[in-house]
Image (cartoon, rainbow, N blue to C red):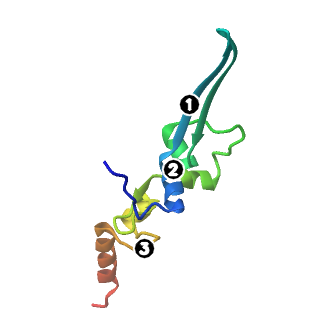
Amino acid sequence: MAPQHDANGSLDHVIETLLDKGLVVNADIMVSLAGVELLGIRIRAALASFETAARYGLEFPAGTNTESIAWRRAIEQKETCPRCGKASPRKQLLEDLCPWCGWRSALAERRAGEIAEHEEPS
């Protein structure tokens, strides 16, 4: 098993993946002297986007405003565009188009065709 280099290994891609998937670190540190525990530290740290943290049910710092428009946008369901691979709101991707590349779902194409039929003069 030889190490492989992926072309998507840029810093931007690593940060995007880290925030999307999340990273949790649990550590127990104990300092003992002659079998006597002098110091014990438990650390639990999480690094993730708010969207990922909400999906996994992590607690947020006190004072986090979960009623804001930005918060509602962060927790709305998203899907990955089949063409560009970027996450977009599920409803927009299925019913309209991808805001990143303009890809349209079959449902959106059909609706656009129906609208065009109704607008054509008889």
Q: Residues within 10 Å of mark 2 (few under 14, many from 20)?
A: some
Residue situated furthest top in the rendering: 35
Residue 70 horizontal side relative to residue 96, left or right:
right
For label 3, the residue is 101
Against 4, is 66 above or below? above
- 2 or 1: tag closer to the N-terminus: 2
| In this rendering, position of residue 122 left or right of residue 50 | left
Residue at (33, 82) in percent of width and height: 116
Q: Which residue is mark 2?
A: 18
Position of residue 25 relative to residue 19, above or below, is above
Q: Residues within 10 Å of mark 1 (few under 14, many from 20)?
A: few
- The percent coordinates of residue 92 (x first, y second) are 43, 64
- Residue at 32% x, 68% y: name it: 105
Q: Which residue is mark 1?
A: 26
Task: Give the residue type at disc 1.
Answer: Asn
Closer to viewer: mark 3 or mark 1: 1
The answer to whether 98 appears left or right of 63 in the picture is: left
Give how far across and how far down residue 29 sits, in percent.
62, 24
In the picture shown, does residue 55 fall above or below 109?
above
**Residue 21 in sight here:** yes
Q: How many marks?
A: 3
